[in-house]
Amino acid sequence: MRVAIHTLGTRGDVQPYLALALGLKEAGHQVLIAAPSQFESFVASRGIAFAHLPSEYLDLMETPVAKAAMTGSAGFTAGFRMMKQFRPIGRKQLTAEWLAARQFRPELIIYHPKAIAAPHIAERLSCNAVLASPLPGFTPTAMFASPLVPFRSLGPLNKLTHSLMAHGAYALFRGMIGEWRATELHLGETPEKRLRPSATLYAYSPHTVAVPPDWPDTVAVTGYWFLGGDEAWQPDPQLHRFIEGGDRPVYVGFGSMPGIDPMSLTKLVLEALAKAGKRGVLATGGGALQGDLGGSHVHFIESAPHTKLFPLMSACVHHGGAGTTGAALRAGKPNVICPFFGDQPFWGRRIDDLGVGPTPIDARNLSADCLAAAIAEATGSPSMQQRANKLGEAIRIEDGVASAIGFLRRRHLLS
């Protein structure tokens, strides 16, 4: 069967879908991933066909206006300016998604929520479309508020928050999408009825967020989609000597989080580790940390596979991205989450609720003292360590990719 996977975003929005693509290919399906051009070699190196989506999307994320919008440092005006800059990129994205589909002719489309063209393309091709997300928030539930709003719960308004987030992109770009539907898909500007996915896959563990009882049977929480292939990785000699040179260090990495001063953040982390009396492995690859500072209690790396590095650590300090959180939980490590924006505060709250990490520290309020206290709590609490170990054991026996494929087969969406 010909399966197209459309995704948009940073590496965290691509890597899980590549894991799913590899599982589908192993099951005998022909698979295409449509993603930003920056990920062509990453995807193609694993033997998966690749279609280009606009590279400008990731470029936009690096602009001052986008960083201000994502961090909230400039209020709503930055958000409006970012939307204005996104519109021509979004229109280009619609065309690129349709070009990829025309050339590949998929029988099934699996799509990230940001791949806004996919449901309309499925309508045009008369094929099934499956929404796939690394976080909940696109199926209404009364159990909790959408991860994209800054509240655990809004009581009777919880379902509304999910609906608003799920259909927000279409509402914002209705005119642009309508023009594209008419001129390129040769459909009516407005669908005759609301386009709903044939099924929804959530690529996280039900041990981290329980399955709401009010979700329909078209929804599956499959477990994380971890990408393999790093089994042969070993720490280089310098990193190995550092890890073995004392108590297990603390991992610290914030990816490519915007709106921060790498030198100031690095100095803050170094001070916090010193105050907590802990050694640290600091990842600089995303640009949030700066590697030319330091002391004997830290070791800098550009990057390393989380599935291999995290088991060697005592705890993990990070921004709370869904993928990084999942990898740290799988390793059985307490998480110290310093969320910046988006769904990161949600995962910080979940870590706190599960008792596998201290209360998250809003990145805007981060200080050496509060980070040192959180690190000390994460590394010094036997009960927290035990809960993290137990959760890690549960996650490690899951096979999210196999679960997703099995669910699609049972729903007769895969032949």
Image (tube, rainbow, N blue to C red):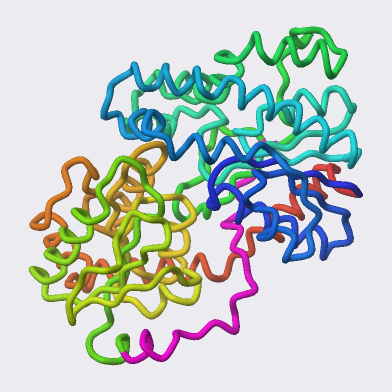
What residue is rendered at 41% in x and 39% in y? 343
Which is nearer the eye, 236 or 25?
236
Which is nearer the eye, 129 or 271?
271
In the picture, measured across the screen, residue 286 lies left or right of residue 353, that is: right
Magenta stretch: give its range: 217-241
Where residue 395 sits: x, y (%)?
A: 51, 65
> In the picture, residue 364 is in which quadrant?
top left
What residue is rendered at 37% in x and 47% in y? 257
Where residue 232 sits: x, y (%)?
A: 59, 84
In the picture, measured across the screen, residue 78 lies left or right of residue 47, that is: left
* For residue 283, above or below residue 246: above
Where residue 284 sits: x, y (%)?
A: 36, 63
Inspect this view and state whether residue 19 appears. no
What residue is rendered at 74% in x and 49% in y? 407
What residue is rendered at 58% in x and 34% in y? 215
Q: Main secondary structure of the magenta part?
A: loop
Inspect this view and state whether residue 60 appears. yes
In the picture, measured across the screen, residue 213 lies left or right of residue 316, that is: right
Where residue 265 sits: x, y (%)?
A: 22, 54
